Image: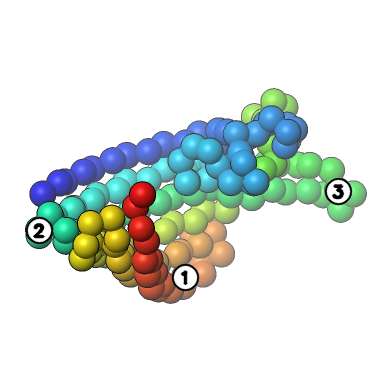
Amino acid sequence: MNLALEYTHLDPFVYSHRSNKSTYTNYLMSLGHALPPNSDEIAAKFSYDITNRLQIDLLYQHQRSGEGIVVDSTGRLIANYGGNINFGLGDAYLRTNGFLDGTRINRDIFTAGIYWEPVRQFYLEGKFQYRIINNLTEDIKFKDSYYFATVGIDL
């Protein structure tokens, strides 16, 4: 049995840069944590090996993010809250924003998974994820869920 508790804090503009050529990304995806910049997360995970070939996982994540880019009618940048890894412009001269400023989004994510290896190096994996996303700035809340299934061979 494994238990894990994790806290992650990413300041605004973490991994981003003024030029997309030098951001900490690969194909616009972060090479660091999956959270966007200007976010934090607390996560709790429980894993249990029922047998040496059957495992269950439960994961809860509570995430908070500050997002948004504000431009005026001429297209001039007024505010960049540092929540977009692919848009780092404004980090040096628009230092008026603090942590979690901008459009505030909270996410609660519940994930349950099962991993089964019926024969050596052949596995089946299934996951169910339920998300509650709450845009506090615009007072919009929605829920969704996903099912994932994987069949694979470890070589």
Separation (CA) of disc 1 from disc 3? 30 Å
Q: 10 Å neighbourhood of mark 2: few (<14), some, or many (≥20)?
A: few
Q: Give me the disc on residue 141.
A: 1
Residue at image mark 2: 51
Q: Residue at x 72, y 27 (%)?
A: 93
Q: Give me the disc on residue 90.
A: none
Q: Where's residue 126, x and y in %?
A: 31, 68
Separation (CA) of disc 2 from disc 3? 59 Å
Which amino acid lies under the numbered mark 1 shown in the image of this protein? Lys
Q: Give me the disc on residue 75.
A: 3
What secondary structure is found at the residue carrying circle 2? Answer: strand
Place residue 118 in its image quadrant: bottom left
Q: Earlier in the sequence, mark 2 or mark 3?
A: 2
Q: Where's residue 74, x and y in %?
A: 90, 49
Q: Nearer the viewer, residue 119 or 95?
A: 119
Q: Please state which of the two labelled residues, at mark 2 or mark 1, is closer to the viewer.
A: 2
